[in-house]
Image (cartoon, rainbow, N blue to C red):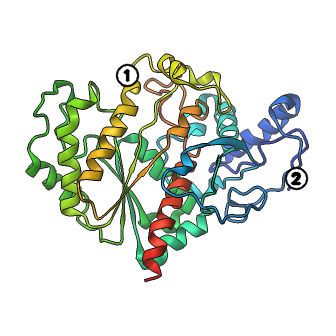
Amino acid sequence: AYTPPLISMGWYKLPHAQSRRGCLILASIALVRGAYFLTAPFQVRSIDAFPYQSSPVIRENICTGDQYREGKWVKSQTTVDFDLCTHHLDWNCAAIDNFNQLNGSMRVGLSLQWKWVPQHCTLHKFSPESMRELLRTKGRKIRYVGDSLNQGMAESMQCLLGKEYEHHVSHVRFDYLGCPDNLPTYTPDYCSNSSHVIHQWRKIVNNLQPRDILVVNTGAHWFGDPDEKKLAFRNIANAIATVFNGTVIMRTTVMGHDSCERFNEPTSNFNSSIQQKQTPSYNWANFTHLNRLVHNTFLEAGLATYLPLYVDMFEQRPDGHVQNSSKNEGMDCLHYCVPGPIHIWNELLYHLLYTILTDEDSV
């Protein structure tokens, strides 16, 4: 399979025949719109055969701690086998944009061309098979717990691993992490019933073992001053420490991007002033403070194994979002398409897990 020189998207295999026809149309259009695309020929291979790699690198300087947060987005010839996405996807942009499926397929393809490259270190090399091996060892499971953004991350991992591993990956919708869902009525003693929170978390982790992994996130549903939620997050963190003795990863919440439909690639021109302009509504401007508060409470809770997963580099990714559309009420510029750029969240997750779990496996 060969892609003509003016097409950079490669051949993105979509899960439905209609989508494949869309890609054939896309190839024709891309010949005209050559300015969008790379000039190098591209051979089609599955994601396992070509796992997000470019040229070989020396990997002695592996990232430790949060070193990976400093870096840049680099364009690379990335392939993703969409046929692995056989399950229902709430944020499948090719399907959401069925009134204009070509547009949805194009946006997905363009957003998948970028990888995150740390400046001073290298990540453990990710591939779907390496992630499968990490889970096969000791029969591990990953459970994503939180809001719809965490659901998108879980669906992304399921796309990467395929149907064979769906019993290793699950998602539990838990917007308030065990607290009452009356957040518009905050009071200083909101979520003060720690016994209630512990009871809720027992149900969430009832079939997990110490070898398993929790990936926790919620932020977009927590409005108002983050400092008003200190007691709530302290009780949440303590509840998890009480009922679960495995690995806990807290993924940070990243802001959305107003008018995301204007972007088809990352932006490096991003600072606090632009951030404020990009967060005119909702609670996006509070995410940085909220992330810090949640991280500190999780640190203090005495969790068996805890690591934060920082995804603040996605402040530079206004592309690849689910877009506003007059025909899709409720769509926004906060969620990302799946498949889409949040595959990188799971690549970073793999880096963290490889660092801590391979040490355990060698014992």
- The answer to which of 315 and 159 lies nearer the viewer is 315
Is residue 224 visible to us here?
A: yes
Image disc number at residue 2: 2
Q: Amino acid at mark 1?
A: Tyr
Image quarter where the N terminus lies is bottom right
Q: Amino acid at mark 2?
A: Tyr
Name the side, left or right, on which 289 lies relative to 113: left
Name the side, left or right, on which 346 lies relative to 236: right
Disc 1 on helix, strand or loop?
loop
Image quarter where the C terminus lies is bottom left
For label 2, count other residues whose C-alpha is less than 10 Å away and answer few (under 14), some (14-19) or many (20+): few
Q: Residue at x 40, y 33 (%)?
A: 288
Q: Quick check: 89 above or below 129?
A: above
Spot occupied by residue 322 in the image (x, y as percentages of width and height): 53, 32
For label 1, count other residues whose C-alpha is less than 10 Å away and answer few (under 14), some (14-19) or many (20+): some
Image disc number at residue 240: none
Disc 2 on helix, strand or loop?
loop
Residue furthest out toward the bottom:
363
How far apart in space, not on screen, are marks 1 and 2 (Cα)? 45 Å
Name the side, left or right, on which 110 lies relative to 237: right
Classify residue 104 by image quadrant.
top right
Q: Residue at x 55, y 24 (%)?
A: 271
**Residue hosting label 1:** 282
Q: Quick check: 229 above or below 145?
A: above
Is residue 86 visible to us here?
A: no
Q: Quick check: 201 above or below 291?
A: below
Q: Earlier in the sequence, mark 1 or mark 2?
A: 2
Classify residue 295 by image quadrant.
top left
Spot occupied by residue 4 in the image (x, y as percentages of width and height): 90, 44
- The answer to which of 96 and 167 lies nearer the viewer is 167
